[in-house]
Image: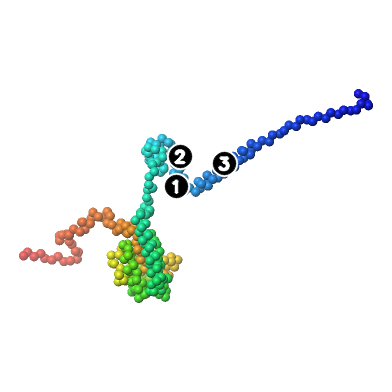
Amino acid sequence: MKKNEPRIVVRRRRPQVEVKHNDSWKIAYADFVTAMMAFFLVMWLVSLVPQKDLQEIAEYFRMPLMTAVKGGSRNETGSSVIPAGDSSVIPNPSPIQSRGDERTEGDLRDTERLENLKAELETLIETDPILRQFRPQLLLDMTPDGLRIQIIDKQNRPMFATGSAQVQSYMRDILRQLGPVFNRLENTISIAGHTDSLQYASGEREYSNWELSADRANAARKELVAGGMEEAKIKRILGLSSSVSLIKDNPAAAVNRRISIVVLNQRAERRIDAQNASGDSATNVQELLAPISGQDLYLPGLPELPVSNW
């Protein structure tokens, strides 16, 4: 190559290889996030299900299919949602078994009537000039047994004379105003007397708070009847002494001395009637009513009289 000849430089570009970006990881990540969201959603829903329902669901999946369809010892003794011997895995829809504490339609109507009576009494207390001045001493509330009206004592205004069942004049006015109101419903009432925890000097051996509370409840009954309430409205009279305090932390408080009148609902009346039923001793009632023969009658301590032969 001659020195005077120009140098020719040939520049060649190398082909650039295009790198393709792989976006498949985004799809995998999105699937992972979706799965985690679904997992936590399921866990949250499971946490809301009661434990009893979870046990039934677990029993459902734990039981073999043929056992559920044909029945068996495991199905009969277990608490599965599938009854033993059912012809179908899915049980037939049936009404929910009523529990003992569920109310019938009649009980609901009865409760509604008592609620209306409560509203009437509250209106009467606010409008009647005699009852309005004793409003702080009249407590009305609904209980499982019915509508309860409590007439409570105050330190400066007791309902009864101290230590006795003598009704004060204003207590008499309250009871006689309430008496006719109870005739508006067929429901019967229960009257309970309560005292404070202060005992008599003789204690429980002689006249005690038990007798006092019972006498006060009976005195309240007399005033209700005198005010116009039918005597047949009385279901029971209770003397509870200080066993049911209104203020449990202070059983000696004056407000624990009270008369509690409960307009019983139908459920409470049925329960009381069932408690008072003779039950198993019913078969012996006729024997108790049978007359006693003279030969079987023996009174110890009496001298024997001579038998006359004429």
Q: Give the position of the C terminus as an image quadrant.
A: bottom left
Q: How many residues crowd around disc 1 within 10 Å: few (fewer than 14), some, or many (20 or more)?
A: few
Of mark 1 and mark 3, the one earlier in the sequence is 3
Res 26 → quadrant: top right
**Amino acid type of the residue tagged 3 in the rendering:** Ala
* Mark 3 touches mark 2? (CB < 8 Å): no
Q: Secondary structure at mark 1?
A: helix
* Distance between the alpha carbons at the discs numbered 1 and 3: 28 Å
Q: Nearer the viewer, mark 3 or mark 2?
A: 3
Instruction: Residue under label 1, please give it.
Output: 52
Q: Nearer the viewer, residue 197 or 244?
A: 244
Which label is found at residue 166? none
**Amino acid type of the residue tagged 2 in the rendering:** Phe
Q: Secondary structure at mark 2?
A: helix
Q: How many residues crowd around disc 3 within 10 Å: few (fewer than 14), some, or many (20 or more)?
A: few
Instruction: Residue under label 3, please give it.
Output: 35
Of mark 3 and mark 2, the one earlier in the sequence is 3
* Distance between the alpha carbons at the discs numbered 3 and 2: 23 Å
**Amino acid type of the residue tagged 1 in the rendering:** Lys
Which residue corresponds to the image point at 23% horizontal and 57% vertical from the top-left?
285
Q: Nearer the viewer, residue 258 or 137?
A: 137
Residue 79 point in image, percent of width and height = 40, 43
Instruction: Residue under label 2, please give it.
Output: 61
Of mark 1 and mark 2, the one earlier in the sequence is 1
Q: Is residue 15 above or below residue 116?
A: above
